[in-house]
Amino acid sequence: MGAALQQYLYTNPVPDDREIIEIHDHCINAYASGKESCAATLVNTFDGLEAEYVRYLEESMSKPIWGVANPLRRSHHGIDNELECIRWLDTWKQNSVLYVSFGSQAFLSEEKTKALAKGIAASKQSFIWMIKDPVGSNVNSCDFLPEGFIEETEDRGLVIHGWMPQLQILLHPSTAFFMMHCGWNSALESMSAGVPMVVWPMAFDQFINAKLVTEQLGIGLQICEGLDVVPSTDIVENIVKAAMTTEIGEDLRLHALKIKESINEASCKLCGIGGFISYILNL
């Protein structure tokens, strides 16, 4: 989650979802207990991204905090040109492809999948879409796509059923935007790669992360929010067009590159861990 920010800005979950409320309360209680007994804290964030929140937490807890997220660098994650999705991306010009993926746990229902697909098709933009099945089911989520969608978009789209190398896709020069649920791990990877986002937060910390991305950092556009919301075709189409074809999208890309630079300049995983180890050894 918006790693430092979330620890004191938990928003209320969807009020009629008992399971989400229980998990939310459990996280709050675990954090409250842990922060009292710990000697220091390691946070999955970049100091160059959330420095003000890290400092706020240090002051409020009177204990040191280190951000230890690992910036992406092309040399660390070489692009494998033998992969189908990478070969496909190689055929497109720079900043021309929308990458669509909703994480490892989020599952789009048939209604949501159809709504997204119709909007993406109507936008006429090139895209690469990773579609996964719900864990433990016999459902093929590709069956949720509207009839004729694959044929209609075959000249500009690639749908992959199952796993794709997300880091390599984000680091590919053709990737312009990342449409996602705004889970913190994916958001960190996108920011570290300098890729702006089109977000649809659905649960838990994703609402906070989306606010950080869209309102504070200025590197994203939001389609809608909530587990039960189904966006209209027009909304998806207009947001995708704004991201991919207008000055709004270009400004977001420039801001995302600045965020990437600040992350690389001010963040060092090893320095954070080294500082933590030195602190612990000297207690």
Image (cartoon, rainbow, N blue to C red):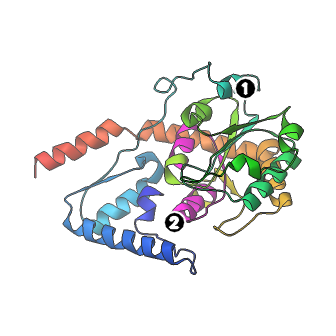
Q: Position of residue 250 (x, y in %)?
A: 74, 42
Q: Can residue 242 be spotted in the picture?
A: no
Q: Position of residue 206 (x, y in %)?
A: 55, 61
Q: Position of residue 114 (x, y in %)?
A: 79, 55
Q: Give the structural element (helix, strand or loop) at label 2.
A: loop
- Specify the segment rendered in magenta: 187-214
Residue at the spot 37% in from the left edge and 38% down from the top edge: 268
| Quarter holding residue 59 | bottom left
Q: How many marks?
A: 2
Q: Estimate how packed mark 2 is, as few (under 14), some (14 to 19) or many (20 or more) residues with alpha carbons within 10 Å.
A: many
> Seen in the image, is 221 located left or right of residue 36?
right
Q: Which residue is mark 1?
A: 88
Q: Which residue is mark 2?
A: 204
Could you tell me the amino acid type at mark 2? Phe
Residue at the spot 71% in from the left edge and 45% down from the top edge: 251
Q: Given contact means CB atoms under 8 Å apart, are the residues at marks 1 and 2 in contact?
A: no
N-terminal of the pair, mark 1 or mark 2, is 1
Which of the pair 151/276 is nearer the observer?
A: 151
Could you tell me the amino acid type at mark 1? Trp
Which of the pair 75/89 is nearer the observer?
A: 89
| Quarter holding residue 70 | top left
Q: Determine if the magenta segment contains residue 210.
A: yes
> Seen in the image, is 139 located left or right of residue 153?
left
| Quarter holding residue 181 | bottom right
Q: Position of residue 195 (x, y in %)?
A: 62, 40
- Residue furthest to the front in view is 138
Q: Estimate how packed mark 1 is, as few (under 14), some (14 to 19) or many (20 or more) residues with alpha carbons within 10 Å.
A: some
Q: Determine if the magenta segment contains residue 191.
A: yes
Which of the pair 268/165 is nearer the observer?
A: 165
Q: Judge whether 147 appears above or below 27 on screen.
A: above
